[in-house]
Image: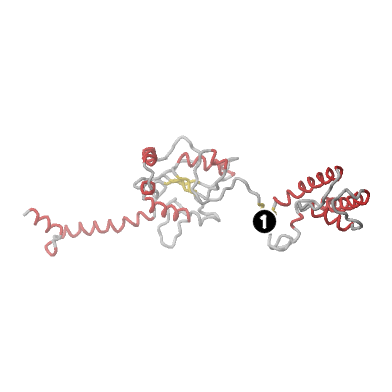
């Protein structure tokens, strides 16, 4: 009898009462509104001021960390954060030219309208949370970008160092560098290492000497002044003529006799500048001389090889 009553209450068909109907309607409405609340309109849970190290919102994951080391299977690593509320420090670029990265409402909420893009950071965090099974939209704080007016001489590294001590995850397009790694900051795989920058990009005004990609065909001359280039050309010619003179004075100075070919000597001297050595000195003075000539050419060509100026 009790079982039949319970079955009747679960599936009342036409005999249900009006109060039970409204209870089911209310329950259905709650289930419909729940996904909408999970997808937007969350207000920032944390309001910790920037660079305030008196408060931390980091989650205690020491137990999970120990379990992973005991049994590091793929399934355990994938589900390590499942069910946790992870605190996130979100750098807010609302109102700047980088608002495609993060764009919140005026009161700091994540936009919920379908046509209101919340930014790449929110999209990536939602995808990461859905795969790892954790929540973050109800436990995030806003980090204002670096400002010389309010932050003084602090740097982006200072913001990153503070944010990872305050939150579980600091969300911004952080560059990986040796300085930051030495501070104990961990980075996700896939980003470039910005420790050494060997390329300098000069802003183009769109017109004039630096206006186009091929507007300056002689940009390779930029590392040295005109006087230095003139000195290099004179040195190449002088070295070639001097070697020709030594070859004429002593026929054993080189394995091959250049005879009356000064242009050949100048050519061999010129390609030494490109680190190609075609001379074959036999005598000690010739060897000593061309050792220093080759060394000087290496010192001159070094900034040309390793300094690239992009226009």
Q: Which residue is mark 1?
A: 203
Residue 25, relative to residue 45: is it above or below?
Answer: below
Q: Is residue 174 visible?
A: yes
Q: Residues within 10 Å of mark 1 (few under 14, many from 20)?
A: few
Give how far across and how far down residue 112 sits, in percent: 40, 57
Comparing 198 with 160, the one in front is 198
Give how far across and how far down residue 259 sits, in percent: 91, 56
- How is the model colour-coded? secondary structure
Q: Is residue 196 left or right of residue 253?
A: left
Comparing 218 with 138, the one in front is 218
* Quadrant occupied by the C terminus: bottom right
* Quadrant occupied by the N terminus: bottom left
* Residue drawn where x is 43% and y is 63% of the image: 115
Could you say whether the residue bearing mark 1 is in a helix, strand or loop?
loop
Extreme-top residue of the structure: 54
Comparing 123 with 250, the one in front is 250
Give how far across and how far down residue 163 sits, in percent: 49, 42
Q: Is residue 97 left or right of residue 29?
A: right
Comparing 267 with 284, the one in front is 284
Give how far across and how far down residue 227 sits, in percent: 84, 51
Q: Is residue 173 left or right of residue 237?
A: left
Q: Is residue 105 visible?
A: no
* Residue drawn where x is 89% and y is 56% of the image: 262
Looking at the rendered structure, the number of numbered marks drawn on it comes to 1
Extreme-bottom residue of the structure: 14
Q: Is residue 307 left or right of residue 30?
A: right
Residue 256, relative to residue 115: is it above or below?
Answer: above
Extreme-right residue of the structure: 249
């Amino acid at each position: 009898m009790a079982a039949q009553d319970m079955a009747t209450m679960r599936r009342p068909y036409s005999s249900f009462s009006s109060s039970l109907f409204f209870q089911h309607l209310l329950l259905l409405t709650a289930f419909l509104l729940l996904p909408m609340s999970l997808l937007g309109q969350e207000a920032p849970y944390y309001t910790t001021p920037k660079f305030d190290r008196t408060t931390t919102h980091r989650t205690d994951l020491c137990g999970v960390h120990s379990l992973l080391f005991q049994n590091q299977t793929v399934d355990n690593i994938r589900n390590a954060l499942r069910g946790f509320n992870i605190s996130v420090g979100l750098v807010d670029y609302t109102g700047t030219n980088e608002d495609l990265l993060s764009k919140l409402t005026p009161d700091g909420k994540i936009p919920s309208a379908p046509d209101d893009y919340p930014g790449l950071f929110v999209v990536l965090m939602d995808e990461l949370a859905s795969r790892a099974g954790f929540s973050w939209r109800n436990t995030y704080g806003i980090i204002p970008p670096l400002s010389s007016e309010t932050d003084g001489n602090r740097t982006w590294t200072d913001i990153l160092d503070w944010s990872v001590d305050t939150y579980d995850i600091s969300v911004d397009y952080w560059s990986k560098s040796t300085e930051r790694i030495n501070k104990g900051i961990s980075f996700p795989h896939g980003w470039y290492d910005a420790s050494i920058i060997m390329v300098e990009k000069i802003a183009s005004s769109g017109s004039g000497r630096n206006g186009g990609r091929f507007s300056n065909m002689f940009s390779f001359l930029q590392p040295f002044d005109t006087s230095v280039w003139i000195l290099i050309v004179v040195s190449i010619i002088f070295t070639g003529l001097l070697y020709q003179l030594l070859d004429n004075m002593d026929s054993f100075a080189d394995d091959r006799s250049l005879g009356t070919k000064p242009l050949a000597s100048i050519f061999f001297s010129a390609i030494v500048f490109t680190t190609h050595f075609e001379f074959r000195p036999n005598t000690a003075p010739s060897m000593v001389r061309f050792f220093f000539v080759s060394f000087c050419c290496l010192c001159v060509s070094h900034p040309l090889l390793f300094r690239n100026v992009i226009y």
